[in-house]
Image (cartoon, rainbow, N blue to C red):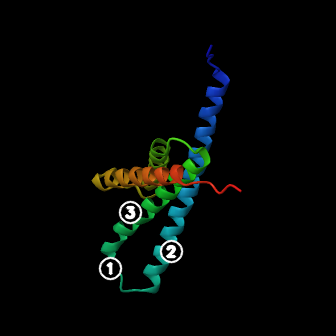
Amino acid sequence: MLSYDKNSDTQGIGRSMKSIVLGTAIGGIVCMLCLVLFAILFVISKGIPQTMVQPLILVACAVGAFIGGYITVRILRTKGLLFGILSGLLLFVIVCLVSVIAIRTPFSTHALIKGILMMLMGAIGGIIGVNKRSKRK
């Protein structure tokens, strides 16, 4: 007879949330490092046009979301698509909150594109993370 254990279900949700937060935090750090690297490149090579700023921000956010989804799912080892999307979504919400609070940018179609891209890259990172074999000896 199968029984339902509420404690194991709660522990599973807690573990999932911790993994999503940890993966998203690492993805956020990677995103910030990419932005710092791009800023240094802008300063060093004075010939980069201003129109490259937005595409480079998208690249940094996409890389951060990919890494965040990958790390999240490597910890959980299950449901790569779902947890990758959730990690990308959480990182997007954090990026949006920071941009609204710090620079007072309104939500726009550019932000919507960034959100879709971040969830997509988080999902791809999650799928790759769940399908990567662990090294076992």
Whole-angstrom CA distance, mark 1 to mark 2, is: 16 Å
Give the percent coordinates (x, y) of residue 21.
58, 46
Dot 3 and dot 2 residues touching (CB under 8 Å): no
* Mark closer to the chain start, 1 or 2: 2
Q: How many marks?
A: 3
Q: Give the residue displayed 50% in from the left and 62% down from the top.
A: 31
* Mark closer to the chain start, 3 or 2: 2
Give the percent coordinates (x, y) of residue 97.
46, 49
Q: Single out the mark in the foreground, 1 or 2.
A: 2
Dot 2: few (<14), some (14–19), or many (≥20) neighbours within 10 Å?
Answer: few
Is residue 87 something that shows in the picture?
yes
According to the picture, the residue beneath numbered tag 1 turns out to be 49
Give the percent coordinates (x, y) of residue 26.
58, 57
According to the picture, the residue beneath numbered tag 3 turns out to be 58
Q: Amino acid at mark 2?
A: Leu
Q: Single out the mark in the foreground, 3 or 1.
A: 3
Q: Give the residue displayed 36% in from the left and 86% down from the top.
A: 47
Q: Give the residue displayed 47% in from the left and 57% down from the top.
A: 66
Q: Give the residue displayed 36% in from the left and 81% down from the top.
A: 48
| Towards the viewer: 82 or 99 | 82
Quadrant for the C terminus in the image: bottom right
* Mark closer to the chain start, 3 or 1: 1
Give the percent coordinates (x, y) of residue 60.
45, 65
Q: Amino acid at mark 1?
A: Pro
Dot 1 and dot 2 residues touching (CB under 8 Å): no
| Towards the viewer: 112 or 134 | 134
Dot 1: few (<14), some (14–19), or many (≥20) neighbours within 10 Å?
Answer: few
Question: Residue 37, labelled with which disc?
Answer: 2
Element type where label 3 sits in the image: helix
